[in-house]
Image (tube, rainbow, N blue to C red):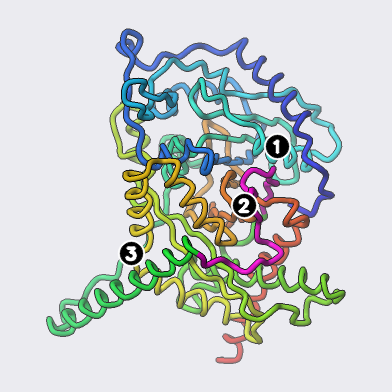
Amino acid sequence: MGSLGLKPIDTKTTIELSKMGMTNGQKNSTVVVVEEEQKKQVQLEPASPATRLFHTKSLSCHIIAILGCTTKINVDLIKKGLESTLLNHPRFTSIPVVDEKKGVRKWKQTTVNVGNHMVCPDLDPDMDSPDEFVENYTSSLTTIPMDMTKPLWEVHILNVKTSEAEATGILKLHHSIGDGMSIISLILACTRKASDPEALPTIPTGSKKESSDEAGFCRRFCFSVWVLSMVFWNTFVDAILFLATILFLKDTETPIKGGAGVEHNPKRLVHRTISLDDMKIVKNALNLTINDVVMGIAQAGISRYLNRRYGNKKGRGSSKTNNLPKNIRLRGSIVFNIRPSAGIKVLAEMMEKKSKAKWGNKIGYVLTPLPISLPDNPLDYIHQAKAIIDKKNLSLESRFSFAAAKLTQDIFGSNVAAKLTNRVLSHTTILLSNVVGPQEEITFFGHKLAYAAPTICGLPHALIMHFQSYCNKMTISMSVDPLVIPDPYQLCDDFEDSLQMFKNAVIKEGAAAV
């Protein structure tokens, strides 16, 4: 998506469109009842600890997944698909309630009218600036609260052609429904390969190194002791830094750090698609992982962007001059799913057969430093990122943060735990995640996808970044506070230029080696 002239988000217009689309959807929709038994008696299911956190004022947030399609979207086809898949999942047919006797939040099964969850505005296909309209529409969803009297999800369909897609579908849901990884897995479970309408998409998995039988017992034992020692030490250090962050340790007040109340500000949702093949070239040349390259891109792009912002303050227009202050502390909060994902095959069978699968919010987070600098060798960004990631892989910080939040919640209640979590996150600068997507083109209820750009809003960050791979592409999806980052497409350019800088560097090193 190219650079666009950014205008204030037209929330009023979007709300009117949403109301118009909701009315049209209600006229033709059919009411779907989950089970006959549920008509006769109310079923209450206890909400998980994390679900209760996400229903507090301090930590109420939403997941927004933007799906670009290569064809116009057939609304009736989407309705039928939702009725046969998502409506078989209990979280999509339940509303949050508070048990009057015990005062505990629970999930209550209810009837679902699909039309009440679909927004399909009538749009002019020949409108001016369709890219800008879609961006303003999706961004305005960050300011519209969800109706808590019905299941906490909705689908918006924008049948207008943009530079990247023939139509755009938007799924918005409350984070209390599930963690990000589970939600993305559930969406993928609703998709099929474009080449085989009956087959689920293929998700690449990390290859595990097989232990050699030739290695002696003594060597394996020593290695195991070393690993356990590193895990203990790294966890201890991370726990101390985590507690220090709760008490006093804050990131440097840089131009991209949000202030108090940033989680309540309107957000602008933008994305940029870069080449996954180029990332693999860098990965293979340096014998690293895609995660290492992702962190290197984030570190380099933010460094370049901050250098420009600091240069503008000093009246220096050139980005080649080092304008960065010394000793910048900038950290990213990386969210981890503590509970292993059920997998798209299990979730697909669950929706098809109405069976059960592991679900819920069980997440922890890791506070990861992002060194801000302008090194002479651009590959130093990736080497630094790898060293940090290797340490974090030998740490139980995510489980410690989860346990700390749960203990606080058990003792002091959800409101205190949510405020504590908000405090930790607000002392960092950005939120980061990287999700592996399908290796081949997929269809969503018969509609081939051009891209997928998931993001989240409602957390105390002015910059939230999600890397989502799909086929041979990597989409960098960002939620930014325009009051803090008024030029998000410049930041997108810096991320894209950073990858090109890495690629050129490894090619140059390879040529020099030959």
Nearer mark to the viewer, of 2 and 3: 3
Q: Secondary structure at mark 1?
A: helix
Q: Which residues are magenta?
A: 248-271
Question: Which kind of residue does numbered mark 1 sit on?
Answer: Ser
Which residue position is annotated with label 2? Answer: 477
Q: Residue at x 83, y 75 (%)?
A: 314
Q: Which of disc 3 and disc 1 is earlier in sequence?
A: 1
Which residue position is annotated with label 3? Answer: 396
Question: Which kind of residue does numbered mark 2 sit on?
Answer: Ser
Q: Residue at x 73, y 74 (%)?
A: 307
Alpha-carbon span between mark 1 and mark 2:
16 Å
Alpha-carbon span between mark 2 and mark 3:
28 Å
Q: Which of disc 2 and disc 1 is earlier in sequence?
A: 1
Question: Which kind of residue does numbered mark 3 sit on?
Answer: Leu
Alpha-carbon span between mark 1 and mark 3:
38 Å
Q: Nearer the viewer, residue 365 or 227?
A: 365
Nearer mark to the viewer, of 1 and 2: 1
